[in-house]
Amino acid sequence: MIGHIESFDSDNHTGTIKSETETYTFHLDDWVAQVPPDIGDDVTFENDGTTAKKVDLVGAYLTPPKAVKRKYVAVALALLLGFTGMHRFYLGYYKMGLAQLALTAVTVGYGALWGFIEAILLLAGHLNKDAKGRPLK
């Protein structure tokens, strides 16, 4: 069956799982996943009356994030339009992009240096994830 964790008491090592209209209890001894349970996690389990056995996380939580954004696009944007913070917008860091744009406006263009430095950081691998924590291609 599939459900989600409604509650989990770490002191007693017990919790409840809601599946459609039914609620099942489980004990940490029946937990299969390597990470501890958390409220809201989607799980698969086998029901034994009102208790859940062999409780495991749904596979989507166990796969590593896939790269969506390209590093070289971010580098090109940083070199060409770094003064506008366009590379930060591309990576999903909207507030940082606005800050770069504001710095460029306030300093009459010196914000372009920030974009150049971040292009080097992108190439060196120090900036290697987008705003959602996904690695860059």
Image (tube, rainbow, N blue to C red):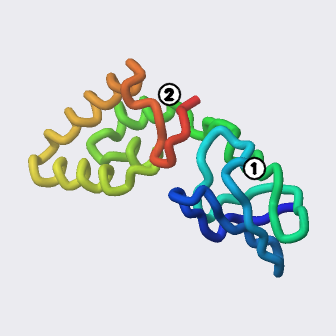
Residue lying furthest front: 12
Residue 50, percent across and down?
84, 71
Q: Residue at x 61, y 68 (%)?
A: 7
Please tell me in which quadrant of the rendered image residue 137 appears. Answer: top right
Position in image of residue 34 (x %, y %): 65, 38
Residue at screen point 54% across, 33% down: 135
Position of the N terminus, as image quadrant, is: bottom right
Give the residue number, with chain letter if any, for mark 2: 72
Label 2 CA crowd tier, 10 Å (few <14, some 14–19, many 20+): some
The kind of residue tagged 2 is Tyr
Residue 97, how many percent across, how many down? 32, 51
Q: CA distance from mark 1 to mark 2?
A: 46 Å
Label 1 crowd (10 A; few <14 / some 14-19 / many >=20)? some
Query: Closer to the camera, 48 or 18?
Result: 48
Left or right: 67, with 98 as reference point: right
Choose between 131 and 56: the one closer to the eye: 56
Front position in the image: 57 or 53: 53
Q: Residue at x 32, y 46 (%)?
A: 85
In front: 129, or 101? 129
Position above or below: 114 against 125: below
Where residue 30 is drawn, which disc sits there?
1
Disc 1 secondary structure class:
helix
